[in-house]
């Protein structure tokens, strides 16, 4: 259910005729209120991990929404799922962890897939959206990194990351696209986006992850980048280029195989403890 709810992000962002920054700000605030009501508390733990993770969550949301307005939904969501590549690179730079064979496999596979994404984009000059989507993959990796720090609280970070979206709300008043389309339909769509797609997805995720193995979770999560462009194609008719489809298949396959190998190794290490 979490993967299903999250997968509507691309479609909703395409249907709302506002800028990506305005959509990110309004959706985040609505989602934060919804999560707070669900938790029956609007308090959160304020520490280094929570602050860093919440900032990364907000940046991921902003970059992803802006990318959706500048490139195809398929490109935006798949490039966000390149986060394992950045996790490997950050581990090498920060913790001096030498990459294993599985890491090198992920770097080569994801890197080749990204190359196919950008091949046609650089030829046409329309590469900014893909660059923003790739940047969201980096900040998405930062979410995982921050939640591994001492005192981490993913649910608090998620709530706070959405709540601080309020600092971006003033932008909507200078957003020409919002001024031109401020009727009830965009507001109804953004309400559904904040309550169902964003908050609902996180609520189902927080419940489901307690009863699902890490391997199953990583496999199920890949439903999001598969379904996301499917909804956009069925409703709007947007179809990625053949090169992007091949690149996306390579990226998702690589991430799926990599996550499966890592989680199985972690499980074996726990058993042999």
Image: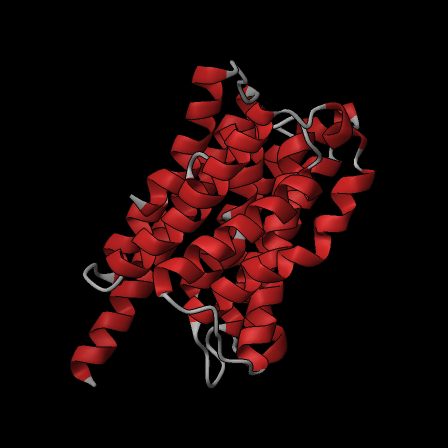
Which residue is at a point 32% across and 60% down the rendered structure image? 206
Q: Percent from the top left, x then y, of residue 265?
A: 28, 69
Q: Nearer the viewer, residue 25 or 123?
A: 25
Quadrant housing residue 3: top left
Q: Position of residue 245 (x, y in %)?
A: 50, 27
Left or right of residue 231: residue 178: right
What is the x, y in percent for residue 173?
A: 79, 41
- In this view of the protein, which residue sits in the foreground, 156 or 113? 156
Write the residue at 81% across / 30% down: 176
Choose top left, top right, bottom left or bottom right for residue 66.
top right
User: Does residue 157 appear in this view?
Assistant: yes
Toward the viewer: 265 or 132?
132
Residue closest to the eye, 19 or 218: 19
Query: Which quarter shows the N terminus?
Result: top left
* Numbered disc total: 0
Residue at point 17%, 82% (across, down): 272
Q: Residue at x 57, y 60 (%)?
A: 163
State the quadrant of the C terminus.
bottom left
């Amino acid at each position: 259910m979490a993967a299903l709810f999250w997968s509507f992000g691309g479609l909703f962002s395409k249907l709302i005729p506002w800028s990506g920054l305005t959509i990110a700000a309004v959706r985040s605030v609505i989602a934060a209120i919804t999560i707070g009501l669900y938790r029956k508390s609007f308090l959160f733990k304020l520490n280094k991990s929570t602050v860093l993770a919440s900032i990364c969550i907000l940046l991921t949301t902003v970059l992803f929404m802006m990318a959706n307005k500048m490139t195809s939904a398929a490109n935006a969501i798949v490039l966000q799922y390149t986060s394992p590549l950045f996790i490997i690179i950050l581990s090498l730079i920060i913790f001096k962890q030498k990459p294993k064979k599985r890491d090198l496999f992920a770097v080569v596979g994801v890197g080749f897939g990204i190359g196919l994404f950008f091949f046609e984009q650089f030829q046409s000059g329309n590469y900014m959206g893909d660059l923003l989507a790739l940047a969201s993959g980096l900040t998405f990796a930062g979410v995982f990194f921050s939640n591994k720090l001492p005192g981490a609280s993913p649910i608090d970070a998620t709530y706070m990351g959405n709540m601080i979206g309020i600092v971006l709300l003033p932008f909507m008043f200078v957003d020409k696209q919002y001024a031109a389309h401020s009727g009830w339909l965009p507001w109804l769509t953004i309400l559904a986006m904040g309550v169902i797609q964003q908050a609902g997805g996180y609520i189902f995720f927080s419940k489901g992850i307690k009863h699902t193995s890490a391997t199953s979770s990583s496999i199920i999560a890949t439903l999001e980048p598969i379904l996301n462009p499917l909804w956009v194609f069925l409703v709007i008719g947007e179809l990625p280029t053949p090169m992007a489809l091949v690149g996306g298949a390579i990226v998702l396959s690589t991430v799926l195989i990599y996550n499966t190998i890592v989680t199985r190794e972690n499980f074996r290490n726990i058993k042999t403890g």
